[in-house]
Amino acid sequence: MDKVTQVEAEPREEFGKNAARRLRRGGRIPGVLYGGGGPAIPVAVDPKTITHVLGSEAGHNALFTLQVRGRAPARVMLRDWLVDPVNGRLLHVDLVRVALDTQLKVKVPIHIVGEPKGVKVQGGILEFVTREVEVECLPEDIPDHVTVDVTELMIGRNLRVSDVPLGDKVKVLTDPTRVVAHVVAPKAEEEKPAEVAEAAPAEPELIRKGKAEEEGGEKEEAGAEKAEKAEKGEKKEGKREPKKESKKES
């Protein structure tokens, strides 16, 4: 995407939610220009132009000229912006004046290039941990991005912020020991123990066995009860007195 060097703006004279809605319906969005020792100026800008700035290589760190009708041009940067969460359209933008001789603190994206040997040869996995670094420098020295080559990374090796090439004009504010990228060994898939798989079908067998034992127990109890009744019957019969034989008359 081409670099945007100038953005046209109109001063705003109406304020409030209704005025902002009318402005958006007319193809513009409200914004404010401030900082740099100058007064705050409400402005209206083309959202497509601001979207173009955000989509450029420098992104929100892009430095461009804001030309407000009736006022002197100012070198500015995007400070903040509001986006509709439903359709992703810009709703509002804040712009800050930038003095070219004053150091700024900004965050610069990190780009990685190359295929690590630890991935290509050893089958490892590249993890991109830190994707931006905070720096301090003059506005015109702000890099669009920082490129880091990860080709030589092997499993267990890493690149830290101190390894990021930024040059002498840029001061790094991020912790230099922070890991930017590293290659790790792939995690071995956990195998289920064989005994667990073998033990799985054993449960229904135990249940069936329990039922069989229960049924067997019931049969034994029924048999014992039957035998007990029979024994009682025999005892009753044993108690009966034998019939007396009648004496024959001589």
Image (cartoon, rainbow, N blue to C red):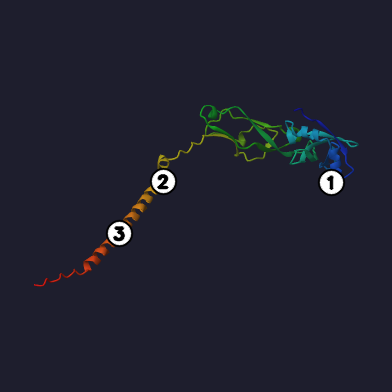
Tell me if 95 is positioned left or right of 199 in this view.
right
Give the quadrant of the C terminus: bottom left
- Name the kind of residue labelled 3 in the image: Lys
Residue mark closest to the camera, 3 vs 1: 3
Residue 192 x/y as whole percent: 45, 40
Residue 7: quarter of image:
top right
Q: From this viewpoint, which residue is outermost toward the front?
A: 250
As measured in the structure, the alpha-carbon distance from the residue carrying label 3 to the one carrying label 1 is 96 Å
Residue 44 x/y as whole percent: 85, 39
| Residue ID for mark 3 | 226
**Secondary structure at numbered mark 3:** helix
Query: Which mark is first along the chain, 1 or 2?
Result: 1
| Residue ID for mark 2 | 204
Residue 140: quarter of image:
top right
As measured in the structure, the alpha-carbon distance from the residue carrying label 3 to the one carrying label 2 is 33 Å
- Local crowd at mark 2 within 10 Å, few (<14), some, or many (≥20)? few
- Name the kind of residue labelled 2 in the image: Pro
As measured in the structure, the alpha-carbon distance from the residue carrying label 2 to the one carrying label 1 is 71 Å
- Name the kind of residue labelled 1 in the image: Lys
Give the quadrant of the N terminus: top right
| Residue ID for mark 1 | 17
Residue 161 x/y as whole percent: 62, 36
